[in-house]
Amino acid sequence: MSALSRLTAVHVDCADPIKLAAFYQQATGWQLTDSGEEFAALDAGAGGPALGFVRVPDHRAPQWPDGAKRLHLDFAVADLDRAVADLLRLGAVKPAFQPGAGAWVVLLDPEGHPFCLAPATTD
């Protein structure tokens, strides 16, 4: 028996929960379940985890590729090039430093948090 059975949520510290939740809602299509000045949340549905955004006073954005980042999100996508183009239109930024030799792409959300896109695998 495992002490932890299922991840239910990931929370991201940020300066503007409403703005960041709106970016990820557009990017994922997940349902907005909570939205306020201090906290906003998205639900992936189908038993997936929630993604929460928590306002932190004087929040300082991480600097990619500085090791001071606290976490990053990984997303599987059907078409890597199209996903990158769509996310850039939504306000993401593609930094110059791209590890992984093309196996995945690192983007930065509107507050500078890194997240990765990798081609979805079919099993």
Image (cartoon, rainbow, N blue to C red):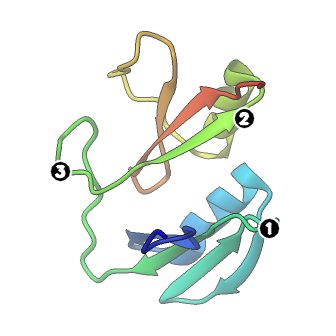
Q: Where is residue 121 in the image (x, y as percent from the top left)?
A: 71, 25
Q: Do the residues bearing badges 1 and 2 touch, measured as CB atoms within 8 Å?
A: no
Q: Earlier in the sequence, mark 1 or mark 2?
A: 1
User: Within 10 angstroms of label 1, few (less than 14), some, or many (20 or more) residues?
Assistant: few
The C terminus lies in which quarter of the figure? Answer: top right
- What is the CA distance from the residue labelled 3 to the residue labelled 1? 31 Å
Q: Residue 4 carries which label?
A: none
Q: Which mark is residue 45?
A: 1
Closer to us: mark 1 or mark 2? 1
Give the amino acid at mark 3.
Answer: Ala
Q: Where is residue 118 in the image (x, y as percent from the top left)?
A: 59, 28
Q: Do the residues bearing badges 2 and 3 touch, measured as CB atoms within 8 Å?
A: no
User: Within 10 angstroms of label 3, few (less than 14), some, or many (20 or more) residues?
Assistant: few
Give the residue drawn at x 46%, y 69%.
2
Label 2 element class:
helix
Q: Where is residue 60 in the image (x, y as percent from the top left)?
A: 24, 64
The answer to which of 56 and 50 lies nearer the viewer is 50
Give the residue drawn at x 46%, y 72%.
4
The residue pinned by badge 2 equals 86
Q: Do the residues bearing badges 3 and 1 touch, measured as CB atoms within 8 Å?
A: no
Label 1 element class:
loop
The residue pinned by badge 3 equals 68
On the picture, is 35 further left or further right than 26?
A: left
In the rendered image, the vertical position of residue 117 relative to residue 1, given as above or below: above
Q: Which of marks 3 and 1 is nearer the N terminus?
A: 1
- What is the CA distance from the residue labelled 2 to the residue labelled 3? 27 Å
The answer to which of 3 and 12 lies nearer the viewer is 3
Q: Position of residue 92 (x, y in %)?
A: 55, 42
